[in-house]
């Protein structure tokens, strides 16, 4: 019985997020605030239509060609830099120390809302967890975006 | 040996002994791995993992003495871009040394020289009578200044029998759009990429510091060739083109994503000097067996191409990425393989969201120097499972091919760096 309890304890312990949620956590930044399901659905639709061929369904990318979108400093890091990748495309830049030989085209034809949705989806899929990006943020970055 | 012979004749036991030793030497002592290195092969064939190099093993060559040279995509932790492997009699090898501080893809040997390429140059090393490189730190730079803009950067190489070397310069673009890979962007008229890329160049194998001006534009309109080989039977260069990507992504009103996964075919071309295979203006539809007008240049998915472009010699499933071509001239494998072609398909990514394909070595039968009859998958399951292959998450990706002196087929893998050797066991 003791053993069972210990095992159970271990189980709950290992599912760290569940534990974290139960604790009356210090009301932190909205980073862990739940993203509305509708936003994720909309973001996924943009992803499937525009990004999936290169970055793949699992966000794992393609060796040496297209970088993964799993926990890269680009995906989880500075929002302005991230939004600009989608607005301007990217080429010849090492991603977390690795070179990739394909080209990321610009997606400035996407609306502010579509870019916000797809990046929010990416930042909360494939093992990523990060705050949402909102359409007004994209709008501001687009307005000052130097090509 | 001459001296010992008469004495041996007096000793029957010793004769038997030496004969069996002899038999061990000529017959192959190479034993396939119990699981054939995880590969699925036709009956009678076996495979072993020769070595784990841990590098991105691109192309490979084996000298007549059996020394193996492997070109790495980028230098390993010791800073070496070319690995030297020596085999024990059981076929297992260790990396005995390395040299060349540059990454790249191409490697090729004649009995006298080893040739290797970076992504913008080609070097030559002298081989001694043991197949060893004598000048690892001072190669001759025979070709320099080739275009490398990252996309389609590999400079694959092969030689003919007349002292010429052929180098692929891949197009640094998908289909010469004004904005590369951007939805709806149209093609640039008189595609400027073709002035220095998108074709095969011929140079002298023994002249130093050649560049575009010294070479011959042997063939044009080839988007990207990674696998190429000289067919000694017909005295002709054969190449494998990687067909264009993203018909659906860039022209969703003209193609479905299903069509985009199946178009265009990966093509084999038999080249003559001056040939034009049509990139970026056309692509090849392997189902209709027709050359089609590219959507960037007025095509709509239905219009056939106009213009005098080369017909492919054979066609294979779309996006499967043929990275090596080898004409088999050995005698170890059964007769049907002689003078036919092996092709290493690195595997697709551009078929998503449809299941991915490839990650296998194909055999293409040849007759009188032409593809004859259907190709077949020869060595399969580099991916580790059908599910891995479909998901585009293979364990290994076949990239290079070489024929050993005994007629074994060597295959490299640039995902984990495994070197495979396929042997025929039945008599």
Image (spheres, rainbow, N blue to C red):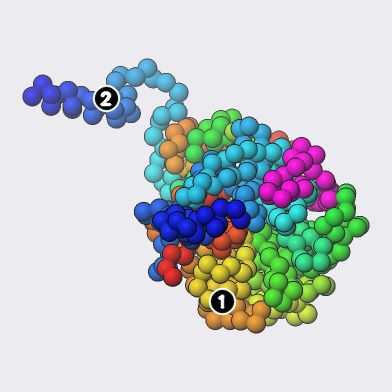
Give the farthest residue toward the right. B213
Q: Residue shown at 44%/41% (left/top)?
A: A125
Would you call the spot at circle 1 few (<14 residues within 10 Å), some (14-19), or many (20 or more)?
Answer: many
Q: Which residues are magenta?
A: B125-154
Report the residue at 58% width, 67% height from top. B330
- Front in this rendered view, residue B136 or B175: B136
Residue B255 appears at what percent x and percent y? 57, 69
Q: Which mark is residue A13?
A: 2
| Discs 1, 2 touching: Cβ within 8 Å | no
Examine the rendered structure and indicate whether residue B284 appears above or below residue B215: below
Quarter that holds the C terminus of chain B: bottom left
Up-down relation of residue A88 to residue B38 (above or below): above
- Is residue B152 highlighted in magenta? yes
Q: CA distance from mark 1 to mark 2?
A: 60 Å
The residue wearing badge 1 is B365
* Count of numbered tags: 2
Q: Quadrant of residue A126?
A: top left
The overriding secondary structure of the stretch rendered in magenta is: loop
Residue B407 falls left or right of residue B295: left
């Amino acid at each position: 019985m003791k053993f069972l309890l210990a095992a159970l304890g271990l189980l709950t312990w290992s599912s760290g997020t569940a534990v974290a949620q139960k604790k009356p956590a210090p009301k932190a930044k909205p980073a862990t605030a739940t993203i509305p399901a509708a936003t994720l659905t909309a973001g996924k639709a943009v992803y499937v239509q525009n990004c999936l061929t290169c970055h793949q369904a699992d966000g794992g990318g393609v060796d040496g060609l297209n970088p993964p979108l799993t926990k890269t400093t680009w995906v989880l890091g500075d929002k302005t830099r991230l939004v600009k990748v989608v607005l301007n495309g990217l080429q010849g830049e090492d991603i977390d120390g690795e070179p990739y030989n394909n080209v990321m085209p610009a997606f400035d034809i996407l609306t502010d809302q579509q870019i916000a949705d797809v990046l929010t989806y990416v930042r909360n899929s494939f093992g990523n967890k990060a705050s949402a990006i909102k359409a007004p943020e994209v709008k501001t970055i687009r307005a000052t975006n130097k090509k | 040996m001459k001296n010992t012979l008469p004495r041996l004749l007096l000793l029957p036991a010793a004769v038997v002994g030496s004969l069996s030793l002899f038999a061990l030497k000529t017959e192959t002592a190479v034993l396939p791995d119990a699981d054939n290195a995880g590969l699925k092969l036709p009956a009678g064939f076996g495979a072993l993992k020769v070595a784990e190099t841990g590098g991105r093993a691109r192309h490979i060559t084996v000298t007549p003495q059996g020394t193996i040279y492997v070109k790495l995509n980028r230098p390993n932790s010791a800073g070496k871009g070319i690995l030297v492997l020596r085999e024990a009699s059981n076929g297992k090898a260790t990396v005995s040394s390395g040299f060349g501080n540059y990454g790249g893809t191409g490697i090729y040997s004649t009995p006298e020289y080893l040739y290797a390429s970076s992504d913008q140059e080609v070097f030559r090393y002298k081989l001694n009578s043991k197949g060893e490189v004598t000048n690892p730190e001072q190669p001759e730079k025979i070709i320099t200044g080739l275009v490398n803009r990252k996309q389609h950067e590999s400079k694959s190489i092969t030689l003919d029998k007349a002292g010429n070397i052929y180098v692929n310069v891949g197009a640094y673009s998908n289909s010469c759009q004004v904005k590369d890979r951007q939805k709806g962007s149209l093609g640039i008229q008189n595609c400027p990429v073709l002035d220095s890329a998108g074709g095969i160049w011929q140079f002298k194998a023994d002249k130093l510091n050649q560049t575009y001006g010294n070479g011959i534009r042997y063939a044009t309109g080839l988007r990207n060739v990674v696998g190429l080989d000289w067919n000694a039977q017909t005295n002709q260069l054969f190449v494998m083109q990687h067909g264009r990507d993203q018909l659906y992504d860039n022209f969703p009103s003209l193609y479905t994503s299903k069509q985009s996964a199946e178009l265009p075919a990966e093509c084999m071309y038999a080249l003559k000097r001056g040939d034009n295979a049509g990139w970026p203006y056309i692509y090849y539809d392997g189902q209709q067996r027709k050359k089609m007008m590219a959507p960037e240049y007025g095509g709509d998915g239905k219009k056939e191409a106009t213009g005098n472009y080369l017909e492919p010699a054979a066609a294979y499933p779309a996006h499967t990425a043929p990275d090596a071509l080898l004409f088999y001239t050995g005698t170890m494998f059964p007769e049907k393989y002689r003078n036919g072609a092996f092709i290493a398909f690195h595997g697709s990514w551009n078929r998503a969201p449809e299941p991915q394909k490839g990650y296998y070595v194909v055999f293409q039968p040849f007759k009188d120097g032409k593809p004859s009859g259907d190709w077949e998958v020869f060595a399969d399951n580099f991916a580790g499972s059908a599910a891995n292959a479909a998901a585009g998450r293979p364990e290994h990706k076949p990239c290079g091919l070489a024929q050993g002196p005994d007629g074994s087929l060597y295959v490299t893998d640039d995902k984990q760096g495994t070197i495979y050797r396929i042997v025929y066991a039945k008599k």
